[in-house]
Amino acid sequence: MATRPLNVLWLIDHVCFDGSLHAGGRLYMNVFPRVDPARVTIHPYFLNASEAVIRTFDAINHPVKTLAWSKYDVLAPVRVGKLVQRHKVDVMHLFCFGASAFGRVASIWNRVPTVIHEFDTPTYGPYPKMFKLADRLLAGRTDFALAASTHCRDFVHEQRSVPREKIDVLYHAVPREKFEIARGLDRATARRELGWGADDFVFLTVTKLGPDRGNETLLEAFAKVHQQMPNARLCIVYRPTLYHRVPTKYQHIPWVTDPVAMRARIDELISKLGLNDCVSLIEMEAPERHEPYFAGSDLLVAPFESEMFSSVNLIEAMVFGRAHVVTDLGEPADIVNRWGTGVKVPPKDPAALADAMIRIAGNPALREALSQKARAAAVDFGVDAVAEHLTGLYTRLADRKQAHAQQVA
Protein backbone atom coordinates (compact mmCIF):
# COMPACT_ATOMS: atom_id res chain seq x y z
CA MET A 1 0.00 0.00 0.00
CA ALA A 2 2.94 2.31 0.67
CA THR A 3 4.10 1.91 -2.95
CA ARG A 4 0.79 2.80 -4.61
CA PRO A 5 -2.03 5.30 -4.16
CA LEU A 6 -4.94 4.28 -1.97
CA ASN A 7 -7.93 2.99 -3.90
CA VAL A 8 -11.14 4.57 -2.66
CA LEU A 9 -14.63 3.60 -3.85
CA TRP A 10 -17.10 6.48 -4.05
CA LEU A 11 -20.69 5.24 -4.22
CA ILE A 12 -23.77 7.48 -4.00
CA ASP A 13 -27.51 6.89 -4.32
CA HIS A 14 -28.21 9.82 -6.68
CA VAL A 15 -27.04 13.41 -7.05
CA CYS A 16 -30.05 15.47 -8.07
CA PHE A 17 -33.48 16.42 -6.72
CA ASP A 18 -34.78 19.40 -8.69
CA GLY A 19 -32.50 19.58 -11.70
CA SER A 20 -29.41 20.88 -9.89
CA LEU A 21 -26.68 18.89 -8.16
CA HIS A 22 -27.09 18.45 -4.42
CA ALA A 23 -24.13 18.43 -2.03
CA GLY A 24 -22.96 14.92 -2.93
CA GLY A 25 -23.07 15.71 -6.62
CA ARG A 26 -20.99 18.82 -6.07
CA LEU A 27 -18.34 16.74 -4.30
CA TYR A 28 -18.20 14.45 -7.31
CA MET A 29 -18.06 17.43 -9.66
CA ASN A 30 -15.71 19.75 -7.76
CA VAL A 31 -13.65 17.82 -5.20
CA PHE A 32 -12.90 14.70 -7.26
CA PRO A 33 -10.50 16.56 -9.63
CA ARG A 34 -8.63 18.11 -6.71
CA VAL A 35 -7.67 14.85 -4.96
CA ASP A 36 -3.99 14.12 -5.50
CA PRO A 37 -3.86 10.99 -7.74
CA ALA A 38 -0.39 10.20 -6.44
CA ARG A 39 -1.94 9.59 -3.02
CA VAL A 40 -5.53 8.51 -3.73
CA THR A 41 -7.26 6.97 -6.74
CA ILE A 42 -11.02 7.46 -6.52
CA HIS A 43 -13.32 5.02 -8.32
CA PRO A 44 -16.62 6.96 -8.61
CA TYR A 45 -20.06 5.41 -9.12
CA PHE A 46 -23.70 6.51 -9.03
CA LEU A 47 -26.29 3.94 -8.01
CA ASN A 48 -28.62 5.88 -10.28
CA ALA A 49 -28.65 9.13 -12.21
CA SER A 50 -31.03 11.02 -14.46
CA GLU A 51 -30.20 11.58 -18.13
CA ALA A 52 -29.58 15.27 -17.37
CA VAL A 53 -27.01 14.40 -14.69
CA ILE A 54 -25.31 11.87 -16.95
CA ARG A 55 -25.02 14.51 -19.71
CA THR A 56 -23.62 17.04 -17.22
CA PHE A 57 -20.82 14.72 -16.13
CA ASP A 58 -20.18 13.45 -19.66
CA ALA A 59 -19.67 17.05 -20.80
CA ILE A 60 -16.58 17.37 -18.58
CA ASN A 61 -15.33 13.82 -19.29
CA HIS A 62 -15.84 12.83 -15.68
CA PRO A 63 -15.09 9.10 -15.23
CA VAL A 64 -18.10 8.43 -12.96
CA LYS A 65 -20.18 5.41 -13.96
CA THR A 66 -23.91 4.90 -13.42
CA LEU A 67 -24.80 1.43 -12.15
CA ALA A 68 -28.59 1.76 -12.55
CA TRP A 69 -29.24 -0.26 -9.39
CA SER A 70 -32.29 0.10 -7.21
CA LYS A 71 -31.62 1.14 -3.63
CA TYR A 72 -33.71 -1.91 -2.65
CA ASP A 73 -31.68 -4.39 -4.74
CA VAL A 74 -30.95 -7.35 -2.44
CA LEU A 75 -27.99 -8.39 -4.60
CA ALA A 76 -26.36 -4.97 -4.46
CA PRO A 77 -24.02 -5.82 -1.52
CA VAL A 78 -22.59 -8.70 -3.56
CA ARG A 79 -22.12 -6.36 -6.50
CA VAL A 80 -20.40 -3.79 -4.28
CA GLY A 81 -18.10 -6.58 -3.11
CA LYS A 82 -17.17 -7.25 -6.73
CA LEU A 83 -16.36 -3.54 -7.25
CA VAL A 84 -14.12 -3.70 -4.19
CA GLN A 85 -12.28 -6.70 -5.61
CA ARG A 86 -12.03 -5.25 -9.11
CA HIS A 87 -10.48 -1.97 -7.93
CA LYS A 88 -8.54 -3.42 -4.96
CA VAL A 89 -10.36 -0.90 -2.78
CA ASP A 90 -8.75 0.19 0.49
CA VAL A 91 -11.56 2.46 1.76
CA MET A 92 -15.23 2.85 0.79
CA HIS A 93 -16.81 6.31 0.88
CA LEU A 94 -20.56 5.69 0.87
CA PHE A 95 -22.96 8.59 0.29
CA CYS A 96 -26.61 8.43 1.46
CA PHE A 97 -28.64 5.52 2.81
CA GLY A 98 -28.72 2.96 -0.01
CA ALA A 99 -25.02 3.12 -0.78
CA SER A 100 -24.08 3.13 2.90
CA ALA A 101 -26.22 0.05 3.55
CA PHE A 102 -24.89 -1.91 0.57
CA GLY A 103 -21.28 -0.99 1.25
CA ARG A 104 -21.38 -1.78 4.95
CA VAL A 105 -22.99 -5.16 4.31
CA ALA A 106 -20.24 -5.89 1.79
CA SER A 107 -17.62 -4.85 4.35
CA ILE A 108 -18.73 -7.70 6.62
CA TRP A 109 -16.79 -10.10 4.42
CA ASN A 110 -14.30 -7.83 2.63
CA ARG A 111 -13.27 -5.97 5.83
CA VAL A 112 -12.68 -2.74 3.94
CA PRO A 113 -13.06 0.38 6.15
CA THR A 114 -16.21 2.41 5.46
CA VAL A 115 -17.02 6.11 5.62
CA ILE A 116 -20.71 6.97 5.44
CA HIS A 117 -21.66 10.47 4.33
CA GLU A 118 -25.02 12.11 5.02
CA PHE A 119 -26.30 15.39 3.59
CA ASP A 120 -29.84 15.57 4.83
CA THR A 121 -32.32 14.57 7.52
CA PRO A 122 -35.74 13.00 6.96
CA THR A 123 -37.92 15.57 5.21
CA TYR A 124 -40.97 13.56 4.24
CA GLY A 125 -41.73 11.95 7.58
CA PRO A 126 -39.98 10.10 10.43
CA TYR A 127 -36.86 8.08 9.69
CA PRO A 128 -38.23 4.63 8.77
CA LYS A 129 -37.90 1.96 11.48
CA MET A 130 -36.50 -0.45 8.90
CA PHE A 131 -33.67 2.00 8.17
CA LYS A 132 -33.00 2.50 11.89
CA LEU A 133 -32.75 -1.25 12.39
CA ALA A 134 -30.37 -1.60 9.45
CA ASP A 135 -28.20 1.20 10.85
CA ARG A 136 -28.06 -0.44 14.29
CA LEU A 137 -27.09 -3.77 12.78
CA LEU A 138 -24.40 -2.14 10.66
CA ALA A 139 -23.08 0.25 13.30
CA GLY A 140 -20.06 -1.97 13.87
CA ARG A 141 -19.18 -1.69 10.17
CA THR A 142 -19.10 2.12 10.30
CA ASP A 143 -15.52 3.30 10.71
CA PHE A 144 -16.31 6.99 10.30
CA ALA A 145 -19.13 9.32 9.26
CA LEU A 146 -19.29 12.73 7.61
CA ALA A 147 -22.27 15.05 7.95
CA ALA A 148 -23.06 18.17 5.92
CA SER A 149 -24.09 20.22 8.96
CA THR A 150 -24.36 20.12 12.74
CA HIS A 151 -28.07 19.35 12.38
CA CYS A 152 -27.23 16.47 10.08
CA ARG A 153 -24.51 15.31 12.51
CA ASP A 154 -27.12 15.03 15.27
CA PHE A 155 -29.30 12.93 12.96
CA VAL A 156 -26.39 10.62 12.11
CA HIS A 157 -25.72 10.10 15.80
CA GLU A 158 -29.26 9.90 17.17
CA GLN A 159 -31.04 8.12 14.32
CA ARG A 160 -28.26 6.34 12.43
CA SER A 161 -26.48 5.02 15.55
CA VAL A 162 -22.98 6.39 14.86
CA PRO A 163 -21.01 7.48 17.96
CA ARG A 164 -20.37 11.24 18.07
CA GLU A 165 -16.60 10.77 18.20
CA LYS A 166 -16.79 9.08 14.80
CA ILE A 167 -18.63 11.98 13.09
CA ASP A 168 -17.12 15.05 11.50
CA VAL A 169 -18.95 17.99 9.90
CA LEU A 170 -17.84 18.64 6.31
CA TYR A 171 -19.41 21.73 4.77
CA HIS A 172 -19.87 22.64 1.12
CA ALA A 173 -16.67 22.67 -0.95
CA VAL A 174 -16.17 25.86 -2.94
CA PRO A 175 -14.69 25.35 -6.44
CA ARG A 176 -11.39 27.04 -7.31
CA GLU A 177 -13.02 29.16 -10.00
CA LYS A 178 -15.10 30.98 -7.37
CA PHE A 179 -11.89 32.24 -5.73
CA GLU A 180 -10.49 33.22 -9.13
CA ILE A 181 -13.65 35.18 -9.97
CA ALA A 182 -13.55 36.90 -6.59
CA ARG A 183 -9.99 38.05 -7.19
CA GLY A 184 -10.93 39.59 -10.52
CA LEU A 185 -14.39 41.05 -9.85
CA ASP A 186 -14.50 44.22 -7.76
CA ARG A 187 -17.53 45.94 -6.28
CA ALA A 188 -17.64 48.80 -8.80
CA THR A 189 -17.44 46.48 -11.82
CA ALA A 190 -20.14 44.19 -10.44
CA ARG A 191 -22.42 47.15 -9.75
CA ARG A 192 -22.05 48.49 -13.26
CA GLU A 193 -22.97 45.05 -14.63
CA LEU A 194 -26.04 44.87 -12.39
CA GLY A 195 -27.09 48.49 -12.84
CA TRP A 196 -26.81 49.29 -9.14
CA GLY A 197 -26.08 52.77 -7.86
CA ALA A 198 -22.58 53.40 -6.54
CA ASP A 199 -23.89 54.99 -3.33
CA ASP A 200 -26.63 52.47 -2.52
CA PHE A 201 -26.16 50.15 0.43
CA VAL A 202 -27.28 46.76 -0.88
CA PHE A 203 -28.45 43.93 1.34
CA LEU A 204 -28.48 40.58 -0.44
CA THR A 205 -30.18 37.28 0.21
CA VAL A 206 -29.81 34.20 -2.04
CA THR A 207 -32.65 31.83 -1.34
CA LYS A 208 -35.83 30.11 -2.51
CA LEU A 209 -39.40 31.29 -1.95
CA GLY A 210 -40.82 28.24 -0.20
CA PRO A 211 -41.86 27.94 3.45
CA ASP A 212 -39.48 28.62 6.35
CA ARG A 213 -37.05 30.63 4.21
CA GLY A 214 -37.74 33.74 6.29
CA ASN A 215 -38.40 36.01 3.31
CA GLU A 216 -41.48 37.53 4.91
CA THR A 217 -39.52 38.30 8.09
CA LEU A 218 -36.72 39.81 6.02
CA LEU A 219 -39.10 42.11 4.14
CA GLU A 220 -40.69 43.30 7.39
CA ALA A 221 -37.22 43.95 8.80
CA PHE A 222 -36.09 45.75 5.67
CA ALA A 223 -39.09 48.08 5.85
CA LYS A 224 -37.71 49.24 9.22
CA VAL A 225 -34.18 49.48 7.82
CA HIS A 226 -35.28 51.60 4.88
CA GLN A 227 -36.94 54.12 7.17
CA GLN A 228 -33.55 54.86 8.73
CA MET A 229 -31.42 54.25 5.61
CA PRO A 230 -33.08 55.83 2.55
CA ASN A 231 -30.18 54.62 0.35
CA ALA A 232 -30.73 50.98 1.40
CA ARG A 233 -31.68 48.44 -1.25
CA LEU A 234 -32.62 44.78 -0.84
CA CYS A 235 -31.88 42.24 -3.57
CA ILE A 236 -33.55 38.83 -3.27
CA VAL A 237 -31.99 36.38 -5.71
CA TYR A 238 -33.97 33.16 -5.78
CA ARG A 239 -34.44 29.87 -7.52
CA PRO A 240 -37.95 28.42 -7.79
CA THR A 241 -38.84 25.89 -5.10
CA LEU A 242 -39.65 22.55 -6.75
CA TYR A 243 -40.45 19.51 -4.63
CA HIS A 244 -40.27 16.02 -6.07
CA ARG A 245 -42.29 15.15 -2.97
CA VAL A 246 -43.87 17.69 -0.63
CA PRO A 247 -42.50 17.45 2.93
CA THR A 248 -45.07 16.33 5.47
CA LYS A 249 -45.06 19.58 7.42
CA TYR A 250 -45.82 21.61 4.27
CA GLN A 251 -48.63 19.49 2.83
CA HIS A 252 -51.33 21.75 4.30
CA ILE A 253 -49.99 24.84 2.50
CA PRO A 254 -52.07 25.46 -0.67
CA TRP A 255 -49.36 27.34 -2.62
CA VAL A 256 -46.44 25.07 -1.76
CA THR A 257 -46.34 23.32 -5.15
CA ASP A 258 -46.95 26.45 -7.24
CA PRO A 259 -43.83 28.55 -7.94
CA VAL A 260 -45.96 31.27 -9.55
CA ALA A 261 -48.09 31.57 -6.42
CA MET A 262 -44.95 31.68 -4.26
CA ARG A 263 -43.63 34.62 -6.26
CA ALA A 264 -47.01 36.36 -6.20
CA ARG A 265 -47.12 36.18 -2.39
CA ILE A 266 -43.74 37.89 -2.08
CA ASP A 267 -44.62 40.52 -4.72
CA GLU A 268 -47.81 41.27 -2.82
CA LEU A 269 -45.97 41.72 0.48
CA ILE A 270 -43.39 44.01 -1.16
CA SER A 271 -46.21 46.21 -2.45
CA LYS A 272 -48.06 46.14 0.87
CA LEU A 273 -44.94 47.35 2.70
CA GLY A 274 -44.34 50.10 0.13
CA LEU A 275 -40.98 48.67 -0.96
CA ASN A 276 -41.44 48.42 -4.73
CA ASP A 277 -38.78 51.04 -5.43
CA CYS A 278 -36.08 49.54 -3.20
CA VAL A 279 -36.53 45.76 -3.39
CA SER A 280 -35.46 43.66 -6.39
CA LEU A 281 -36.75 40.10 -6.74
CA ILE A 282 -34.61 38.25 -9.26
CA GLU A 283 -35.23 34.71 -10.46
CA MET A 284 -32.01 32.84 -11.17
CA GLU A 285 -32.08 30.05 -13.72
CA ALA A 286 -29.42 27.43 -14.31
CA PRO A 287 -26.55 27.83 -14.76
CA GLU A 288 -26.70 30.07 -11.71
CA ARG A 289 -24.37 33.06 -11.71
CA HIS A 290 -24.38 34.59 -8.24
CA GLU A 291 -20.90 36.09 -8.36
CA PRO A 292 -21.82 39.66 -9.44
CA TYR A 293 -24.39 39.80 -6.64
CA PHE A 294 -21.88 38.62 -4.06
CA ALA A 295 -19.25 41.08 -5.30
CA GLY A 296 -21.60 44.03 -5.66
CA SER A 297 -23.55 43.74 -2.42
CA ASP A 298 -22.57 45.12 0.98
CA LEU A 299 -24.09 42.64 3.45
CA LEU A 300 -25.59 39.16 3.10
CA VAL A 301 -28.71 38.22 5.07
CA ALA A 302 -29.78 34.59 5.70
CA PRO A 303 -33.11 34.78 7.58
CA PHE A 304 -33.89 31.03 7.56
CA GLU A 305 -36.53 29.74 9.96
CA SER A 306 -35.54 26.08 9.73
CA GLU A 307 -32.21 24.50 10.59
CA MET A 308 -32.45 22.19 7.59
CA PHE A 309 -31.42 24.68 4.92
CA SER A 310 -28.00 24.66 3.29
CA SER A 311 -25.23 27.21 3.81
CA VAL A 312 -23.92 26.88 0.23
CA ASN A 313 -24.68 30.45 -0.80
CA LEU A 314 -23.44 31.85 2.49
CA ILE A 315 -20.10 30.09 2.12
CA GLU A 316 -19.65 31.16 -1.50
CA ALA A 317 -20.46 34.77 -0.52
CA MET A 318 -17.66 34.53 2.07
CA VAL A 319 -15.20 34.02 -0.79
CA PHE A 320 -16.11 37.59 -1.79
CA GLY A 321 -15.67 38.82 1.77
CA ARG A 322 -19.36 39.19 2.49
CA ALA A 323 -20.14 39.59 6.17
CA HIS A 324 -23.60 38.36 7.09
CA VAL A 325 -26.55 38.47 9.43
CA VAL A 326 -28.03 35.02 10.01
CA THR A 327 -30.68 33.48 12.19
CA ASP A 328 -29.46 31.40 15.11
CA LEU A 329 -30.21 28.06 13.45
CA GLY A 330 -28.38 25.26 11.68
CA GLU A 331 -25.40 25.68 9.40
CA PRO A 332 -25.26 29.51 9.23
CA ALA A 333 -25.28 29.78 13.03
CA ASP A 334 -22.55 27.14 13.32
CA ILE A 335 -20.39 28.98 10.80
CA VAL A 336 -20.76 32.25 12.71
CA ASN A 337 -19.99 30.46 15.99
CA ARG A 338 -16.85 28.78 14.66
CA TRP A 339 -15.42 31.41 12.33
CA GLY A 340 -16.86 34.69 13.67
CA THR A 341 -17.84 35.89 10.21
CA GLY A 342 -21.17 37.52 11.00
CA VAL A 343 -23.90 38.25 13.52
CA LYS A 344 -26.73 35.99 14.71
CA VAL A 345 -30.31 37.01 15.50
CA PRO A 346 -33.33 35.01 16.70
CA PRO A 347 -35.47 33.54 13.91
CA LYS A 348 -38.84 35.12 13.07
CA ASP A 349 -37.88 38.39 14.77
CA PRO A 350 -38.09 41.32 12.30
CA ALA A 351 -37.08 43.91 14.92
CA ALA A 352 -33.90 42.04 15.92
CA LEU A 353 -33.04 41.40 12.27
CA ALA A 354 -33.53 45.07 11.38
CA ASP A 355 -31.41 46.21 14.32
CA ALA A 356 -28.53 43.93 13.28
CA MET A 357 -28.75 45.03 9.64
CA ILE A 358 -28.67 48.70 10.64
CA ARG A 359 -25.86 48.19 13.16
CA ILE A 360 -23.53 46.48 10.70
CA ALA A 361 -24.43 48.80 7.84
CA GLY A 362 -23.66 51.82 10.02
CA ASN A 363 -20.33 50.51 11.29
CA PRO A 364 -17.81 50.25 8.42
CA ALA A 365 -15.02 49.13 10.75
CA LEU A 366 -17.08 46.21 12.07
CA ARG A 367 -18.16 45.30 8.56
CA GLU A 368 -14.56 45.29 7.33
CA ALA A 369 -13.41 43.16 10.26
CA LEU A 370 -16.16 40.61 9.55
CA SER A 371 -15.33 40.76 5.85
CA GLN A 372 -11.69 39.89 6.48
CA LYS A 373 -12.72 36.97 8.68
CA ALA A 374 -15.09 35.75 5.97
CA ARG A 375 -12.36 35.77 3.30
CA ALA A 376 -9.93 33.96 5.59
CA ALA A 377 -12.49 31.35 6.61
CA ALA A 378 -13.53 30.72 3.00
CA VAL A 379 -10.17 29.06 2.35
CA ASP A 380 -11.17 26.30 4.79
CA PHE A 381 -14.18 25.56 2.57
CA GLY A 382 -12.24 25.43 -0.70
CA VAL A 383 -12.08 22.24 -2.74
CA ASP A 384 -8.36 21.87 -2.11
CA ALA A 385 -8.84 21.99 1.65
CA VAL A 386 -11.71 19.47 1.45
CA ALA A 387 -9.70 17.16 -0.82
CA GLU A 388 -6.80 17.25 1.64
CA HIS A 389 -9.18 16.58 4.54
CA LEU A 390 -10.61 13.52 2.79
CA THR A 391 -7.17 12.24 1.81
CA GLY A 392 -6.07 12.44 5.43
CA LEU A 393 -9.18 10.56 6.56
CA TYR A 394 -8.72 7.78 4.00
CA THR A 395 -5.06 7.44 4.93
CA ARG A 396 -5.80 7.14 8.65
CA LEU A 397 -8.44 4.47 8.07
CA ALA A 398 -6.23 2.46 5.71
CA ASP A 399 -3.25 2.71 8.07
CA ARG A 400 -5.42 1.62 10.99
CA LYS A 401 -6.59 -1.44 9.03
CA GLN A 402 -3.02 -2.31 8.07
CA ALA A 403 -1.79 -1.94 11.65
CA HIS A 404 -4.62 -4.17 12.88
CA ALA A 405 -3.80 -6.81 10.26
CA GLN A 406 -0.17 -6.81 11.35
CA GLN A 407 -1.15 -7.22 15.01
CA VAL A 408 -3.38 -10.18 14.17
CA ALA A 409 -0.61 -11.76 12.08
Image (spheres, rainbow, N blue to C red):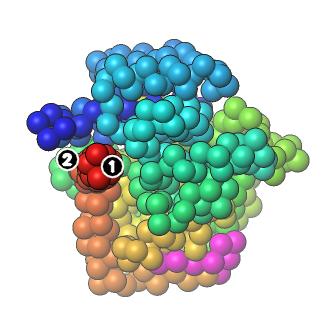
Query: What's the distance in space between the residues labelled 1 and 2, CA to CA?
Result: 50 Å
Q: Is residue 355 visible?
A: yes
Which residue appears at 54% of the width and 15% of the height? 68
* Side of 192 relative to 314 (left or right): left
Which residue appears at 46% of the width and 84% of the height? 359
How crowded is the residue under tag 2: few (<14 C-alpha within 10 Å), some, or many (20+)? Answer: few
Q: Where's residue 329, x and y in %? A: 59, 69
Q: Where's residue 177, x and y in %? A: 24, 42
How crowded is the residue under tag 1: few (<14 C-alpha within 10 Å), some, or many (20+)? Answer: few
Q: Secondary structure at mark 1?
A: helix
Find disc 1 in the rendering and name its residue: 408
Which residue appears at 62% of the width and 56% of the height? 161
Q: What amino acid type should be assigned to the residue bearing mark 1?
A: Val
- In reply to whether residue 350 is colored magenta, the answer given is yes
Per the rendering, the mark at residue 180 is: 2
| Quadrant for the N terminus in the image | top left
Residue 395 lies, with reference to residue 151, above or below; the image says above
Which span is picked out in magenta? 342-351
